[in-house]
Image: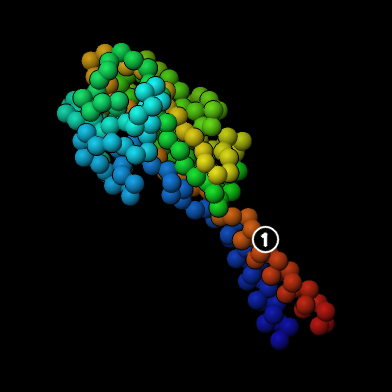
Amino acid sequence: MKKNLGLVVAGLLTLALASAAGASPITTLFGTGLSAGGVALPGAAIDPHYLDVQTSTQAIVRTALPATYFPNDASSEWIWENADGTPLSVTRTFRTTFDLTGLNPSTAMISGAWGTDNTGLAIRLNGNVTGITLPGASTTNFSVLHAFTISNPAWFSSGINTLEFDVQDVGGFSAFRAQLSGTAAVPEPATLALLGLGLAGLGFSRRKQ
């Protein structure tokens, strides 16, 4: 009986440790040009997740994309202030938010890729400058998407988080795009509860000896 109880306790502790090490997807984090359900939107549709900060309006999915742009796919699409890519020669900030309620913010990580026509000035998380940029006005800033990772635990917060992209156009066409995914560990209380059960079982086993 004692041996069986020991096995149960060991199993609970193992499960607790696995829970602490595991990660859950951040389901409220979306790439550009996606619906509330995460499905690619049609051209000229309003993007519900990205705000054009300068105009205080939601971004719009681009139409009639230049052939030089990296093609849209199910993970993200090109957006801008207007569907036709106007205005030109402006600096814009596109803001999205995601919710870490129920997740451990100190374990959060964002993986993504972005592109812009023309220059990526900055990416900020909750006001923290990440140092991620797309310098210059090279065509490679929009002919391919550029991978990045944000994992500094000090930059993430419990509850609502704000992610901002500063981009600049120098004429011709304008567009911005980001594909995003993220993970964070399961809540600490669940882990502690499992550990508590394991320790309680261990204490009971010792009292019976």
Residue 88 in view here: yes
**Quadrant of the image occupied by residue 48:** top left
83 sits left or right of 26 in the view: left
Task: Please name the residue shown 64% across and 58% down the image.
Answer: 189
Q: Quadrant of the N terminus?
A: bottom right
172 sits left or right of 3 in the view: left
Instruction: Look at the picture and state if 105 lies above or below 140.
Output: below
Task: Please name the residue shown 53% across and 25% down the image.
Answer: 129
Task: Please name the residue shown 36% across and 23% down the image.
Answer: 55
> Looking at the picture, how far across and down is residue 42, in whole percent?
21, 40
> Looking at the picture, how far across and down is residue 113, in whole percent?
38, 34
110 sits left or right of 92 in the view: right
Query: At numbered mark 1, what does the secondary structure look like: helix, strand or loop?
Result: helix
Q: Nearer the viewer, residue 158 or 112?
A: 158
Kind of residue at badge 1: Leu
91 sits left or right of 194 in the view: left
Residue 137 in view here: no
Instruction: Look at the picture and state if 170 lies above or below 124.
Output: above
**Quadrant of the image occupied by residue 3:** bottom right
Q: Quadrant of the C terminus?
A: bottom right
Residue beneath disc 1: 192
Q: Nearer the viewer, residue 164 or 17?
A: 164
Q: Nearer the viewer, residue 193 or 93?
A: 93
Task: Please name the residue shown 29% across and 27% down the image.
Answer: 80
Q: How busy is the neighbourhood of tag 1: few (under 14 within 10 Å), some, or many (20 plus)?
A: some
**Quadrant of the image occupied by residue 18:** bottom right
> Looking at the picture, how far across and down is residue 21, in whole percent?
58, 55
> Looking at the picture, how far across and down is residue 95, in whole percent?
42, 31
